[in-house]
């Protein structure tokens, strides 16, 4: 039973675990808008809880754009949640109406209970570093990409590491998408570093997630056919393949890299109703599973639901695949 809401579309999500409970945070917007493309500009962060990643109890909205003029009064988008020193930290994407919501920054909110979130006064905690990343230029791209922060303890040393969606300054505009990174000792002050992945294949690599499976390191991301560069399209065509929409990954033999794009087809793509913005988590039995957003359908309609967990397997050659019994869910649970 996939997780759905009768009156809202659901899309990007992230999960925090507290004891036996999984806390699902997700972007959602009212279906009354009519056009699903409008959902991005009317998103609030929803909250649901489950003990098995299948049966979710919807709690309600827990975070939204600032009601006063601020750097995040336009939108509050995708992020991640981490517990540190007894307090939950929520890293999120924000934009301001003063900039027509075109320039993205990363902020921080904290909570003791995973539902009542207070903005940290230091926000935004990460802004664009023009040494490494592309500033907004409407002639080149539709926005300034600095979003979707994934934060955890640094796998290569002390402190914490953040991965985020970004674009580099040089190269063909349709292939500048990379996964950027930053380091922090205290989760408040961050040092932005050069991107971890190489540009050339995609205009954007959205919703990154770092994880380790089978002795290797992976950076999940999602992208679409329309965000695939002409260079990649030509390379795929030479092999008789086509661009895909869905969730894929970069892989490295060690956490510090070097990173390379995963071989073969996407981990989850159109063949499995996209499963966009996928996340891999451990289920209650300790097995890695993928959950993803089931979005646009072949008829053009938009479902806006979150799939049930699908088992994944890391192969000896470095590929991640959906387990044979895995499939996108056809039965839907409405919260």
Image (cartoon, rainbow, N blue to C red):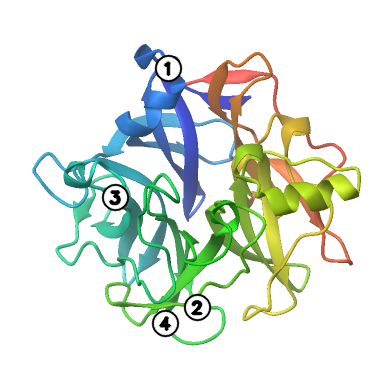
Q: Is residue 321 visible?
A: no
Where disc 2 sits, the SS reads loop
Residue, disc 1: 35
Left or right of 193 on screen, residue 303: right
Callout 1 secondary element: loop
Give the label, 4 or 3, closer to the camera: 3
State the separation of the CA atoms marked 4 and 2: 6 Å
* Marker count (numbered): 4
- Name the one closer to the observer, 111 or 43: 43
Towards the viewer: 265 or 278? 265
> Going 83% across and 45% down the picture, which residue do you hit?
323
Find out whether the residues at labels 2 and 3 contact each other: C-beta distance under 8 Å: no
Circle 2 residue: 154
Task: Give the mark nearest the N terminus, 4 or 2.
Answer: 2
What quarter of the picture does the N terminus occupy? top right
Tell me if 176 is positioned left or right of 79 in this view: right
Residue 97, x across and y down, in percent: 19, 41
Q: Earlier in the sequence, mark 2 or mark 3?
A: 3
Asked if residue 212 lies left or right of residue 19, the reply is right
Question: Disc 3 marks which residue?
Answer: 94
Q: Distance from label 1 to label 2 (Cα)?
A: 40 Å
Q: Using a 10 Å C-alpha cutoff, classify the residue at mark 3 as few (fewer than 14 neighbours), some (14 to 19) or many (20 or more).
A: many
Q: Mark on residue 159?
A: 4
- Measure how far apart labels 1 and 4 are at the Cα level: 43 Å
């Amino acid at each position: 039973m996939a997780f759905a809401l009768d009156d809202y579309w659901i899309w990007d999500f992230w999960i925090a675990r507290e004891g036996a409970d999984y806390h699902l945070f997700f972007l959602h917007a009212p279906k009354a808008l009519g056009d699903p493309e409008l959902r991005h500009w009317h998103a609030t962060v929803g909250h649901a809880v489950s003990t098995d990643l299948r049966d979710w109890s919807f709690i309600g909205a827990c975070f939204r754009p600032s009601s006063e003029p601020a750097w995040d009064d336009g939108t509050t988008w995708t992020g991640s949640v981490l517990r540190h020193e007894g307090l939950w930290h929520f890293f999120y994407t924000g934009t301001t109406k003063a900039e027509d919501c075109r320039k993205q920054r990363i902020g921080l909110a904290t909570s003791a209970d995973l539902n009542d979130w207070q903005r940290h006064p230091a926000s935004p905690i990460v802004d664009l570093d023009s040494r490494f990343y592309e500033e907004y230029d409407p002639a080149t791209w539709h926005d300034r990409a600095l979003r979707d922060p994934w934060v955890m303890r640094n796998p290569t040393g002390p402190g914490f590491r953040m991965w985020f969606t970004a674009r580099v300054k040089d190269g063909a505009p349709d292939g500048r998408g990379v996964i950027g990174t930053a380091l922090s000792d205290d989760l408040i002050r961050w040092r932005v570093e050069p991107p971890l992945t190489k540009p050339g294949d995609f205009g954007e690599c959205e919703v990154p997630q770092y994880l380790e499976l089978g002795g290797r390191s992976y950076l999940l991301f999602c992208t679409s056919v329309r965000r695939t560069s002409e260079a990649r399209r030509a390379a795929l065509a030479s092999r008789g393949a086509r661009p895909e929409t869905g969730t894929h990954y970069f892989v490295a033999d060690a956490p510090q890299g070097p990173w390379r794009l995963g071989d073969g087809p996407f981990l989850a793509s159109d063949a499995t109703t996209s499963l966009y913005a996928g996340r891999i988590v451990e289920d209650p039995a300790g097995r890695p599973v993928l959950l993803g957003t089931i979005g646009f359908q072949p008829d053009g309609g938009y479902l806006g639901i979150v799939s049930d967990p699908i088992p994944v397997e890391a192969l000896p050659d470095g590929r991640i695949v959906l387990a044979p019994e895995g499939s996108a869910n056809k039965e839907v649970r409405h919260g």
